[in-house]
Amino acid sequence: MSEVQEILEKESKRDERIVESIEGNANLIEIDESSLEASNIYTLDQIQQLCIKYRLRFLDSTHFKGEIPYEAVQKVKALEDQIGEELNHFKIIAPKELFKLTDKDSDPILMLPLKNDRFYFIHKWGGEISSLRSILAFPMRNFMSMFWFLAGLAVVFSLLVPTPSFDVFIFLFVHSFIAICGMACMLVMSMRENFSNVEWDSKYLS
């Protein structure tokens, strides 16, 4: 029983050390990648595309304010056993609200930095990153996505209004597009939001 108790205490201290490592801000260590699964390694460009598409942030785990789940800690332990050394530097992909607030319905992803701007996927908790989130995030991906979204709204609005000729339709489209752009600018500025391709790796609120 004493041996069992000693093992449990040792594992408990190891769990605490891993959580502290995720919540802390230690220096990046060089890792032997030969034992890692190649399918779990992502480049910075791939992560940037993911963050822009779904309007997420990619920051050091020290900025993360949510709860680190037990499953994530166990996967870090398994990875440490696999590569034979302690890990102490992590990054997380999550909605910006999770770096300020706790939202159990969001989908954080724990990543381990590697060399040459590459990152190793460790664990994702929450639900799947849904297509609905991608659709809702589309207008704020970049300037051109906002342009096409507002143009689409103007087209739909113009189609819903009966017009006697194509010339009147074009007139209505142009003026409704200008009005919608004006309202969108005021809304975005009042919310202090920025495009995802600008803020995907920013540690600041906006």
Image: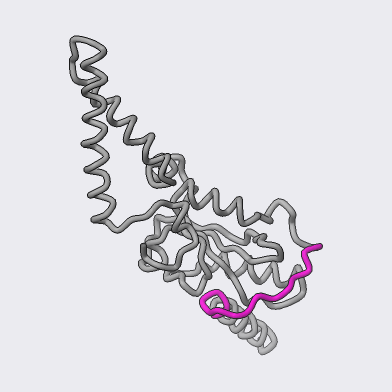
Q: Quadrant of the N terminus?
A: bottom right
Quarter of the image where one finds residue 65: bottom left
Residue at the extreme bottom of the image, as rendered: 2
Q: Is residue 178 above or below residue 172?
A: below
Which residues are drawn in magenta?
A: 20-34
**Residue at (37, 62) in percent of width and height:** 97
**Could you say which is closer to the camera, residue 22 or residue 196?**
196
Position in image of residue 119 (x %, y %): 65, 61
22 or 188: nearer the viewer: 188
Q: Residue at x 41, y 61 (%)?
A: 96
Q: Is residue 62 magenta?
A: no
User: Residue 107 placed where, x, y %?
Assistant: 47, 55
Q: In the rendered image, which quarter is residue 31 located in?
A: bottom right
The rendered magenta stretch, by its main secondary structure, is classed as loop
Q: Is residue 123 left or right of residue 81?
A: left
Image coordinates of residue 50 in percent, x first then y, are 53, 49
Residue at x-position 73% and y-position 73%: 30
